[in-house]
Structure formats: C-alpha cells, structure tokens
Image: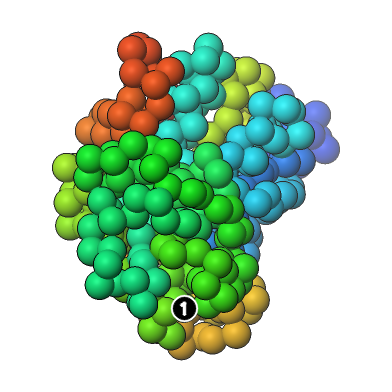
C-alpha cells in the first residue's frame, strides 16, 4: 500500500473512525502465509536468474514475504520436494506441470520465467569430427544437470528427432555448477546438455563445440518447430486456493524481476547476483548473460503454442505419456500474472 493509505488507516484506528474501504485494502494485502519455502534445482544457472533478481533486489520483501530458498541438485529433485510437502512453491521446468496433471496431481504454473529453454548441447572438442548431429550421440556418455531434469529431456528429444531412442546413450548427472565444467575437462563425459554459465565457460575454454543452442528463438524453433517455455514458478492447486493473496504477491515479485531484466545490462545483472555465480570469471559471466538475455520471458505468460510444444516433446519421449490426455489449460493459471501487470 502507499504510505498515505497506511497513515489514513492508522489515523482511523486511533480515533475510532470507521473506514471500511481502507481496512479492506489493508486486509487484502496481508498474505495468508508470509514465510514461503521455495525449491529450485540449480539457483546459480541463468535459467533461474529471475528468481535471484527477485531475491537480491528485495522484490519478495517489498511484497511482505519472507521467501526461503532451498537449492536442490536438479529440477526433478525440486519437484519431489513440492510433492513431498517440504516446499510451498518451485521455480522449475514447465513440463513438470504437464507430467503431474497427467498423474492426477494438480500442479500449476503461475509465471513464465523463461520463454526459451536456454539449454545448449555441446560435444567434447576432440569428438566434434565424429559427433556432428544428435544422431552421433548414440552410445556416448552425456552430462546433464540431473536425471529427469529439463537438460536430460531436451537432449533425449534431440536424439529421438534424429532417429535414435531415448535410451541410446548414457546420461550422467553432473550438477548445476563447476562440477559440470570439471566433468567435461576430465573427460568423464563425451557431450553435455547444460546451461549458462557452465556452457559459456566450456565454450570460452575451447572444451566443447556447440551443436544445438536454444538460448535464442532461432535455435529453439530449429529444434522444436516453435516456442518452448522453460522455467516457470509453479505450485499445487490447493496452495493457490488456500493462499490467493500470497500467490498474487509472489507473482508481483517475479513480474517486477522480469521487467527489470528486460532493460538491465549484463553489467547490471552481474553486479546484482552473488559473486560466486561468476565462476571466478566475471568477464565470462557477462558474455553468458549476453548470450542468454533473449531467453527470459517478457510477459510472464506461458503461450498456448509453447504448452503444445512441450506436451509433444513429452509424448515423444515417455511411453506412458503417449496416449495421455491433458487439458493444458489446467497447467497454467494466468490470472495472477494478469493482475501483476
């Protein structure tokens, strides 16, 4: 509320004057649940940058929320924490909402954070002559953030599109930070499906040759044929029902982060995040931000085209999803981001 509104409410309460309109405004802004547990799978990745911006620039506190963030080893683990009840909300891949709805669990996205996956598939430089397309990944060891994560799904989708089967390679969880860089440098993996700044570091050091790049609209359309939303803020339907004001305040904070990112320079962003996110190389981080800047959502809205694209990917990869019917409208509640705007 604006300062003058707070003063008016205080004055009314002190004098006994009834101002029901102002009192209702005050009540409407009070979150049902002030302390929020939020799960994420790799907070330092640029995939989740809107979360870090909302946290570091005080947007959660501005909305009267105390958001405590738990960083998991990957998106699949963050989802498990939501289903298990240890967190209230998650910033994770949109596809999790479809998979959960297919299982009869009401999990819904509230805000789109990434409009493109921003995932890059690269091969070890010494193997670049042998692995020129996704078909060449057959029998190889591929590093992903964690099994079941969006990095895992995307490389599998690229393989299926190239005529392979999802299980035609070995997938190794390499984590979300420096461990992914180390796995490639040590020769423990032949290829990697990962995100910035890990990819930016491997590119800059000449360790990999990029084969597929979904940090841009052109690269995303080349692989998926259209839009393909990435990270979203999601939660359970019953959390939304019990905490509509809290849910709205969360959406407000994330929308402010997206609008700030829209005009922020790479330097602004690098200065806003924890220094450890730079991987001891700020110039490299600046390049990574510049490469990924196109991927963050401009509207916070998951488009219908993107929902259908992700659903098609899941149907192609997971036999149990092949014949499942999901009302995609249930995977995204756009009312809160509409009010945030």
Q: Secondary structure at mark 1?
A: helix
Q: How many marks?
A: 1
Q: Quadrant of residue 328?
A: top left
In the image, is residue 172 above or below residue 182? above
Residue 2 appears in view = no
Is 309 placed above or below 209 here? above
Q: Is residue 149 visible?
A: yes
Residue 170 is situated, as x and y percent measured from the top left of the image, at: 49, 49
The one nearer the camera, 305 or 225, is 225
In the image, taking residue 332 as reference, residue 275 lies left or right, namely: right
Q: Nearer the viewer, residue 90 or 104?
A: 104
Considering depth in this image, is 249 or 103 the residue closer to the camera?
A: 103
Q: Nearer the viewer, residue 6 or 72?
A: 72
Q: Which image quadrant: the N terminus?
A: top right
Coordinates of residue 227 in the picture (x, y in percent)? 24, 43
Residue occupied by mark 1: 201
**Residue 242 to residue 22: above or below:** above
Q: Tell me the quadrant of the picture where the C terminus can be found.
A: top left
């Amino acid at each position: 509320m604006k300062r003058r509104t707070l003063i008016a409410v205080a004055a009314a309460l002190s004098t006994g004057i009834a101002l029901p309109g102002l009192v209702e405004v005050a009540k409407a802004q009070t979150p049902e649940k002030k302390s929020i547990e939020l799960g994420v799978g790799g907070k330092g990745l640029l995939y989740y940058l809107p979360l870090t911006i909302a946290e570091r620039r005080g947007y959660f506190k501005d909305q009267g929320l105390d958001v405590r963030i738990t960083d998991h080893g990957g998106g699949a683990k963050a989802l498990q924490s939501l289903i298990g009840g240890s967190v209230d909300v998650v910033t994770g891949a949109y596809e999790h909402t479809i998979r959960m709805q297919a299982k009869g669990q009401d999990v819904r996205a509230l805000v789109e954070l990434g409009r493109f996956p921003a995932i890059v598939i690269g091969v070890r430089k010494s193997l670049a002559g042998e692995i020129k397309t996704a078909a060449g990944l057959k029998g190889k060891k591929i590093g992903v953030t964690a099994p079941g994560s969006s990095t895992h799904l995307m490389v599998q989708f690229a393989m299926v599109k190239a005529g392979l089967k999802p299980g035609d390679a070995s997938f190794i969880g390499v984590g979300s930070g420096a461990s992914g860089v180390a796995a490639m440098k040590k020769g423990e993996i032949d290829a990697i499906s990962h995100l910035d700044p890990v990819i930016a570091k491997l590119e800059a050091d000449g360790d990999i040759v990029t084969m597929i790049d979904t940090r841009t609209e052109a690269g995303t359309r080349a692989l998926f044929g259209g839009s393909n939303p990435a990270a979203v803020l999601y939660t359970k339907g019953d959390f939304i029902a019990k905490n509509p004001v809290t849910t709205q305040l969360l959406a407000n904070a994330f929308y402010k982060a997206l609008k700030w990112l829209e005009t922020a320079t790479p330097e602004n962003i690098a200065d806003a995040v924890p220094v450890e996110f730079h991987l001891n190389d700020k110039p490299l981080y600046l390049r990574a931000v510049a490469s990924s800047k196109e991927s963050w959502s401009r509207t916070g809205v998951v488009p219908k085209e993107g929902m259908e694209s992700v659903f098609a990917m899941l149907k192609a990869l997971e036999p149990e999803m092949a014949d499942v019917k999901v009302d995609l409208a249930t995977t995204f509640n756009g009312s809160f981001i509409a009010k945030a705007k």
